[in-house]
Amino acid sequence: MIDVHCHLNFHSFENDFDEVIKRAHESGVEKIINVGTSLESSQKAVELAKNYENLYSIVGIHPHHADKLESGWEKELETIAKNKKVLAIGEIGLDYFSYKSNGIVNPSLQKKIFETQIQMAHKLKLPLQIHNRQAGKDILEILKSHKNILKETPGMFHCFAGEIKILKTALALGFYIGFDGNITYNGIAPGENTSLKDLVGYTPLERIVTETDAPFLTPIPKRGSRNEPSYVIIVGETIAKIKNTSFSEVDKITTQNAMSLFKLNAMR
Ligand SMILES: [Zn+2]
Ligand SMILES: [Zn+2]
């Protein structure tokens, strides 16, 4: 399997990422993609990818950090994105959830930073990895208005949540859909109205990619501890159960999906 979205570049893995990567490979996770959320963590993801054969990176500015940028950030990000083993621009998008720590970043600023990065991805011929929290409608509007520059495989929505209507449009635009350990949770998350299990059920397996978002969103039965890429296996098993198919089928198809979305065959 492939973990297409995690953050081994964050502090919580500082002391043991060697073991974490080893455990992942021993569990059957072939490749791990670390994702940046700021210039610093993007640079860190690129450095990690240099040191480990099966690590790759995705670089970008998360909407949370849209108000912490200094002039010249575009140039810096572009330089980082030109490194080898950078597979996409992400995680980028919009986040309208009000967090206790920093509330909601000004939506028009979020949109501006998102659009700048869509343009950059187009220029560098990289797909998008999109973060959406309760902003599906606005994200789709922006994507539709950039339809002329989105290629046949424009990218993926990471950690998908939202209404079926949003999912349908994302699929119609050609996006892959990422699911995480929270698909093992019961009930519906605050602010949402569609269960993740229903969203998994609706998404064709040919369009699903698997991820952990480690250190966050630890799946049941590991919930309560730090998440890590080896647990992407649990995500695969849960998808298999929901779709009433075998784990090996989910493993095979989602791996193929990630390989083709991120052109990983060509990178070998
Ligand atoms: Zn995210
Ligand atoms: Zn993330």
Image (cartoon, grey):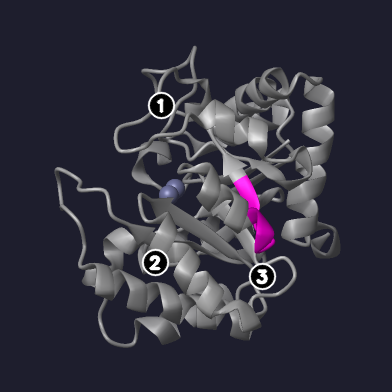
**SS for callout 3:** loop
Q: Which mark is residue 208?
A: none
> Which residue is rendered at x = 20% and y = 48% of the image?
98
* Residue type for callout 2: Ile
CA gap between label 2 and label 1 equals 23 Å
Residue 118 part of the magenta-drawn span: no
Above or below residue 98? Residue 77 is below
Name the image quarter holding residue 85.
bottom right
Tell us which disc is closer to us: 3 or 2.
2
Residue 125 appears left or right of 57 = right
Q: Is residue 172 left or right of residue 229?
A: right
Q: x, y (%) of residue 204?
A: 74, 40
Give the quadrant of the C terminus: bottom right
Task: Report if the CB atoms under discs 2 and 1 are less than 8 Å apart.
Answer: no
- Tag 3 near tag 2, CB within 8 Å: no
Q: Mark 1: which amino acid?
A: Arg
The magenta region covers 171-177
Q: Position of residue 225 (x, y in %)?
A: 39, 20
Picture quarter containing residue 249? top right
Looking at the rendered structure, which numbered label has been put on residue 226? Answer: 1
Q: Is mark 2 within 8 Å of ligand 1?
A: no
At label 3, the amino acid type is: Lys
Circle 3 is placed at which residue position? 84
Q: Residue furthest front?
A: 165
Q: Can residue 79 be seen at all in this image of the molecule?
A: no
The outermost residue toward the top is: 221
**Left or right: 220, with 83 as reference point:** left
Residue 131: % across, % down: 45, 55
